[in-house]
Image: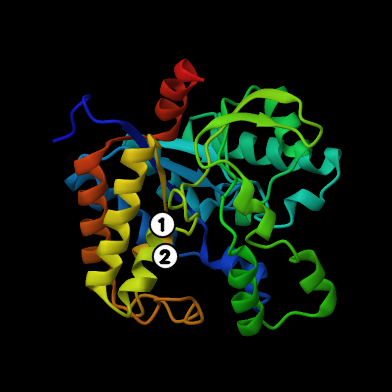
Amino acid sequence: MQTNSKPSASLSLDLDNLWSYMKTHGDAGWESFPSYLDVVVPRVLKFLKERNLQITFFVVGQDAALEKNRAALKSLTEAGHEIGNHSFNHEPWLQKYTMEQVEAEIAQAEGVIEKVTGQKPIGFRGPGFSVSDSVIAILNRRGYLYDASTLPTYIGPLARLYYFMTAKLKDEEMSKRDNLFGSVKDGFRPIRAHFWRSEDGVEQKIIEIPVTTMPIFKIPIHVSYIIYIATYSPALAMLYFRMALWLCRITGTQPSLLLHPLDFLGCDDIKELAFFPAMNLSQDKKLKLVDEVLHLYASHFNVMPMQKHANAIRVSL
């Protein structure tokens, strides 16, 4: 049972759909918007309910615009979870958009997400951790409380290289994705929540809640990464995560842990994403690992949705 004596922490899930992974990877057939939301959403909601966890789901506007996904997305708010904006088209090159394009992208997603779920998003996460001063300016103008698009790690280019090695992309498409998963300079971003500073050093009123990486070392600790390590050694994966949580505690870092749908889907569920790391594991093995990770997380921190976490953080900033 969680207690208020623990430091606060947040938990979120980027509800990337099958088509959005295929689109970014350059796979044919994404234009028909194939979906696995009818499978993964009930599975995740059951999992969270059994563990008494309330989290934030970042929803893609294009999914909310399709009738076939609406029942699954509505069930998220019916279960009491927060809904965040994850853009409309889920293009991880959002930082290349003009100000007008950013406005349209965020507003269109916001409108359809609110219509379907009954909840207006006040938090945003850019696809592929893409963010810019233009994005923050639009979020400020539209009354958002927080952004959660930064991943403070140095290894983004390595992840991008692996992705390109498995993708079938033309040069033009590769150039769009030249900042996918970020650059080395992202490793110099703060791990702790803070008010966003523009490139010219001006502080904005919107709170930036980074996806937490391991303090000091700044290597990823989101759940997909833990599962990937577990394909080599489950014991090593949990030791790695324990170390990350210990470092969060001793450095006073209030973590924000990230989940993805593929953390709940195994090789027995879906074949199209076999190129993804850890997709050789069954759903049962993945669910066991996620259970261990979240049990450990909740034993050290008071886990809450991101809006509640942002409000708690704002008091101390």
Q: Secondary structure at mark 2?
A: helix
Query: Which residue is identified by label 2?
Result: 225
> Given the image, on which type of amino acid does mark 1 rest?
Ile
Q: Secondary structure at mark 1?
A: loop
Inter-mark Cα distance, 1 to 2 = 6 Å
Which image quadrant is residue 253 in? top left
Q: Are marks 1 and 2 in contact (CB under 8 Å)?
A: yes
The crowding category of the residue bearing disc 1, from other C-alpha atoms within 10 Å (few below 14, some 14 to 19, many at least 20), is: many
The crowding category of the residue bearing disc 2, from other C-alpha atoms within 10 Å (few below 14, some 14 to 19, many at least 20), is: some
Query: Which residue is identified by label 1?
Result: 221
> Given the image, on which type of amino acid does mark 2 rest?
Tyr
Query: Residue at image x 48%, y 53%?
Result: 15
Q: How many marks?
A: 2
Q: Is residue 88 above or below residue 33?
A: above
Question: Which residue is nearer to you in this view: 129 or 123?
Answer: 129
Query: Residue at image x 34%, y 68%?
Result: 227
Which image quadrant is residue 238 in? bottom left
Question: Which residue is nearer to you in this view: 174 or 39?
Answer: 174
Residue 176 x, y percent position in the rendering: 79, 65
Query: Residue at image x 61%, y 57%?
Result: 128
Q: Quadrant of the N terminus?
A: top left
Would you say 175 lies left or right of 148 here?
right
Residue 121 seen: no
Query: Residue at image x 61%, y 44%?
Result: 189
Residue 32 marker: none
**Residue placed furthest toward the top:** 315
Residue 287 x, y percent position in the rendering: 25, 64
Question: Which residue is nearer to you in this view: 269 or 149?
Answer: 149
Would you say 47 lies left or right of 10 here?
left
Question: Which residue is nearer to you in this view: 101 or 227?
Answer: 227
Residue 212 x, y percent position in the rendering: 46, 47
Would you say 49 lies left or right of 59 here?
left
